């Protein structure tokens, strides 16, 4: 065999391997989403593994209504690719229609693909916190949102003017939004201005708090009315700010009293998480204390999780709290509810 023939055959084999890998990736994503949406008559809350960012798809028990909370990052490796693949696979053989989209706040790890969502999906209602950001990403998103609003294609809800309002999502699930920022307008950090979303399905409840940090947590604990503060008490918590030590103070965890906690965060030393260093050891320990004293009804598989200790400036291996799931460890995490019982399914993210 001539050298050039050998090279051609070698290149052909490499191309075949690349094709096989691509097809495997697509297949795993399709199987992942199909397995996550196999339940019938159950509320499904799917936390996509988008690395250092948030992206959550909620499917109504009737299977016909969908809500998206945040859309991943553009800077963390493969965050946008995985988010778009997961979302598209969830709507295979279905109209690309989202009843509600929530942008918790304007940071890139939450609105990374939001303009893409608005241009590729029919969105009935769009909710944000009413804040602005001096970034090209936010400016482009704002232009698209306003264009669709003027054309009558989209209903816009400005969160800071509609705190403690119900949002029409689906017949079986009550959805309410609230913002500590609306109660205390002096909250200056964009994270603390996040939209919080509470969902209720029969006896089960969920709370998504974006990147809300300690100051906003104190507002909810100390300046909400008793009725408003009761909204914090839920079964499932989307942990604030990717498990940072600026969020999830012990008093707040006690007020929420979760059975299940989910953290969406990136890998140690990877992309934007090289700087942010999430999750933090102190936060993991706060949840570990909670679940030791309040054993969850659904338990995660025992595992060691890398967590950053800000006191020593080093990463440490921390035992996973028994009621906690993390996208960095578990991949895509889906919590299902039949209105009484909660279950958790996980599917590793393809590399």
Image: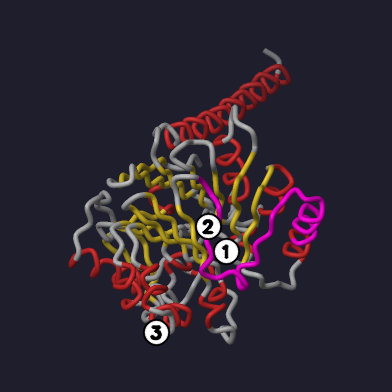
On residue 316, the disc is none
Quadrant of res 111: bottom right
Residue depicted at x 45% and y 60%: 198
Horizontal and vertical percent for residue 122?
A: 69, 43
On residue 222, the disc is 3
User: Of 258 and 288, which appears nearest the observer?
Assistant: 258
Check disc 3: other Cα within 10 Å, few if <14, some if 14-19, many if 20+. few
**Labelled pair 1, 2 in contact (Cβ < 8 Å):** yes
Report helix, strand or loop for mark 3.
Answer: helix
Q: Nearer the viewer, mark 1 or mark 2?
A: 1
Name the residue carrying label 2: 54
**Labelled pair 3, 1 in contact (Cβ < 8 Å):** no
**Left or right relative to 220: residue 30:** right
Horizontal and vertical percent for residue 304?
A: 29, 57
Residue depicted at x 43% and y 80%: 224
Name the residue carrying label 1: 104
């Amino acid at each position: 065999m001539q050298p050039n023939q050998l090279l051609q055959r070698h290149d052909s084999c490499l191309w075949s391997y690349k094709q096989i890998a691509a097809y495997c990736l697509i297949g795993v994503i399709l199987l992942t989403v199909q397995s996550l949406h196999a339940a019938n008559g159950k509320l499904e809350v799917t936390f996509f593994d988008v690395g250092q960012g948030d992206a959550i798809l909620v499917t109504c028990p009737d299977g016909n209504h969908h809500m998206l909370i945040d859309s991943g990052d553009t800077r963390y490796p493969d965050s946008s690719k995985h988010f778009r693949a997961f979302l598209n696979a969830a709507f295979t053989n279905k109209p690309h229609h989202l009843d509600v989209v929530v942008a918790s706040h304007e940071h890139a790890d939450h609105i990374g693909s939001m303009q893409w969502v608005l241009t590729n999906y029919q969105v009935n209602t769009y909710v944000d916190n009413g804040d602005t950001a001096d970034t090209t990403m936010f400016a482009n998103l704002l232009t698209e949102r306003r264009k669709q609003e003027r054309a009558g294609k989209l209903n816009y809800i400005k969160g800071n003017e509609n705190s403690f309002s119900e949002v029409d999502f689906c017949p079986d699930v009550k959805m309410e939004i609230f913002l500590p920022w609306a109660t205390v307008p002096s909250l200056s950090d964009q994270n603390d201005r996040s939209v919080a979303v509470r969902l209720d399905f029969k006896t089960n409840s969920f709370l998504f708090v974006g990147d809300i940090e300690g100051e906003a947590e104190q507002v909810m604990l100390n300046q909400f009315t008793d009725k408003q503060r009761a909204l914090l008490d839920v079964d499932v918590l989307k942990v604030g700010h990717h498990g940072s030590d600026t969020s999830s103070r012990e008093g707040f965890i006690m007020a929420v009293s979760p059975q299940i906690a989910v953290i969406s965060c990136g890998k140690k030393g990877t992309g934007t998480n090289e700087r942010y260093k999430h999750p933090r050891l102190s936060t993991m320990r706060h949840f570990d204390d909670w679940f030791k004293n309040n054993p969850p009804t659904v338990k995660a598989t025992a595992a060691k999780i890398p967590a950053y200790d800000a006191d020593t400036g080093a990463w440490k291996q921390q035992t996973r709290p028994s009621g906690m799931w993390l996208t960095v460890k578990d991949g895509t995490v889906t919590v299902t509810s039949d209105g009484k019982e909660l279950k958790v399914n996980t599917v590793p993210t393809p590399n």
